[in-house]
Amino acid sequence: MFHGPDAALIILAPVLAPLAYKVGVHPLHFAMIMILNLVIGLITPPLGACLFAVCSIGRMPLETVIKPVLPLTLALIAVLMLITYVPAITMTVPKLLGFI
């Protein structure tokens, strides 16, 4: 939440990926979870870069933009829970294509 997605990816991925692998999470699945988490961070304050960019481009106050974005953010969190706890959702296509 307090880093941009690029810095968070560079700092956290090398630390968390080996831990996730030791716990039994496939590296590809972990990458999908991490990227979706970073996307959610892009649209939530305090450092929601995309949210502030949209406000600037549309010349609208942040309060006006947050209300319509809230249901979409909740949907993203629901999708994050689904792909985190049901790995078959994200791992079926890579298995069929022979990546796993």
Image (cartoon, grey):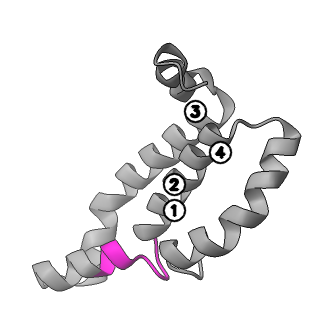
Mark 4 near mark 2, Cβ–Cβ under 8 Å? no
Q: What kind of residue is marked 3? A: Leu
Spot occupied by residue 26 in the image (x, y as percentages of width and height): 70, 36
Residue at mark 2: 35
Q: What kind of residue is marked 1? A: Leu
Instruction: Answer with mark 3 or mark 2, whichever residue precedes in sequence.
Output: 2
Magenta stretch: give its range: 44-52
Name the mark nearer the viewer: 4 or 3: 4
Spot occupied by residue 67 in the image (x, y as percentages of width and height): 32, 64
Q: Which of 61 and 57 is in front in this view?
A: 57
Residue at mark 3: 82
Instruction: Answer with mark 3 or mark 1, whichever residue precedes in sequence.
Output: 1
Asked if residue 58 lies left or right of residue 81, the reply is left
Give the CA separation, mark 4 to mark 2. Answer: 9 Å
Residue 91 quadrant: top right
Local crowd at mark 1 within 10 Å, few (<14), some, or many (≥20)? Answer: some
Q: Residue 69 carries which label?
A: none
Q: Residue furthest right?
A: 22
> In this rendering, is residue 44 above or below 74?
below
Q: Which residue lies furthest to the front in this view?
A: 98
Residue at mark 1: 38
Give the quarter of the figure containing the C terminus.
top right
Residue at mark 4: 30
